[in-house]
Every structure is written in C-alpha cells, then in structure tokens.
Image (tube, grey):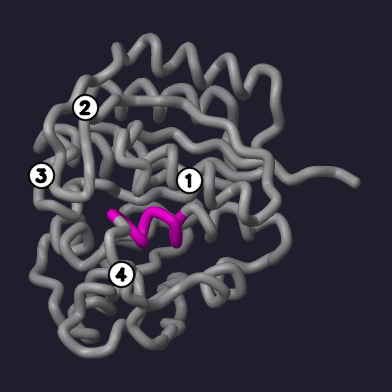
Amino acid sequence: MEVSTALTIAGSDSGGGAGIQADLKTFSAFHVFGMSVVTAVTAQNSLGVHGVHELPPAFVARQIDAVLGDFRADAVKLGMLASAPIVAAVAGRLRHHRVEGLVVDPVMVAKSGDPLLTADAREALIGEVLPLALVVTPNLHEASVLAGIPVETLSEMQEAARRIHALGPRYVLVKGGHLKADPTDLLWDGREVTRFDAPRFVTAGFVAAAFVATAAIATDFRAHSTQSSASSRVSAGTS
C-alpha cells in the first residue's frame, strides 16, 4: 500500500504545541509520512515566545531541495516563515519543484501575542506565496491583515475571503475560532461560500489548535478530492 506524504515548512516550537512539532504529530495521527523543513527555532512555551532564531534563507532552501529532491510530497504545509528573505527563498524553491498541493497557514502572531512575521515579510507572503497556494487558512487577525479590512463578523469574514482569493489562492478558509459567538469557518472557492459550524473545542494548555487544523487539512487532500470535503472533517472551532 502506498503511504501518503506531507512536508511541513515552519518554525520549531520548543513547547511542542505548534510549529513543526504539532504538524508532524498531526501527520502521524492521519497515518501520513511527515517530513520537515525548519525556518526558525523558537524558545517558546504556553506562556509566550521567549526568543526566535531565524535560519539562513539559503539553508532553508537547501533543506527544501534535500527533501523534495528525494521524496514525493503529496501536500506541503507552510507555517512560520519569519522574514522576507525566508519567504522569498521558500517561494523560489516551491516554484522550482512545482509544488501543487500547497496549504498556507499565514502565521503572523503567536497565541500569546508575540509577532512571528516581520512587516516586510507580510508583503512578500502576499506577493510570492499566496499565488502558489491551493488553500490559505487565515484566522480573523490574519484575514484582516491580508484583506486590509476589519474582520470580526461573518459578513466581514466573507468579504475578507473574497479579497484574499483575489490575491491568488484557489481556496480561502477563514477560521472563526476568535468569533465572540460560536465558532464558524467560511470557505470561499471563487464562486460560493461553504459554512462550517461546530461547538467550540476547548484546548486547555494547548498552544495552537489552528496549527493542527491546517496540518490536518493538508494531510486530508490525498483521500478527498475537494477542499470542501477535506475542510469539513477538521474545520470549525479553531483559531
């Protein structure tokens, strides 16, 4: 039996609740062979980010070449990219290797509020990465930054999804875990909106449930032909 594969390109979370650690755990839970490329190393726990050390962009690119030059990746999930040079290096290698199943979690701020993406890197993410994405999965804050509008309600989530879709990704899943009401996620495919409702899932002591949700979507693509079916299995109730 052929084993499905997934690659995570993200930062390392020493607390294990986010980043490549959370992604690899999720891949394993879905019986997917996981591979990783580290973009930055963080000193982090459930209380906050105490330090960030970015890897040289050329070495990030070398990791991608080493993995994709040998292994098949059915899906690639992007997380923390940290800086504009790293964004450019990652985007360049993804284009070189003609990656198609790209799931982008536009990580900008840690759950603790600590910034994880520089201002110039945001522009690089929009210009170089989003056009390559099969799906992008922003939370409300990230959707607001990408779309350039406040995003606090379902109607604003829908408008943000439309605007982000115009930046190039095939699908946009705006995660509503930060809504004041019950969490609702909205998926926009360029034609219609699909709504995912679920009870709020409390993750006491867990750093970032949304990292897990995005990784789960990435692993689910091989088994499900549409983004909607993959999203419905893991969506709603995350932030």
User: Of discs 2 and 1, which sits in the foreground?
Assistant: 1
Across and down, in percent, residue 160 comes to: 23, 70
Give the number of the disc on residue 114: 3
State the residue at coordinates (28%, 75%): 176
Relative side of 8 to 41, left or right: right
Q: Main secondary structure of the magenta part?
A: helix
Across and down, in percent, residue 82 comes to: 23, 31
Across and down, in percent, residue 173 comes to: 39, 67
Q: Amino acid at mark 3?
A: Asp
State the residue at coordinates (21%, 49%): 46
State the residue at coordinates (51%, 30%): 36
Q: Amino acid at mark 4?
A: Ala
Label 2 sits on residue = 84
Q: Amino acid at mark 1?
A: Asp
Query: Does the rendering let one see residue 166?
Result: no
Q: Which region is colored magenta?
A: 207-214
Q: Which badge, 2 or 1, comes first in the chain's sequence? A: 1
Q: Residue 233's quadrant in the figure?
A: bottom right
* Residues at marks 3 and 2 touching, judged by CB atoms closer than 8 Å: no
* Residues at marks 2 and 1 touching, judged by CB atoms closer than 8 Å: no
Label 4 sits on residue = 161
Give how far apart the Cα atoms at labels 3 and 2 are.
Answer: 18 Å
Give how far apart the Cα atoms at labels 2 and 1 are.
Answer: 23 Å
Q: Which badge, 4 or 2, comes first in the chain's sequence? A: 2
Give the number of the disc on residue 196: none
Q: In terms of depth relative to the viewer, which is nearer, 70 or 36?
A: 36
User: Of discs 4 and 3, which sits in the foreground?
Assistant: 3
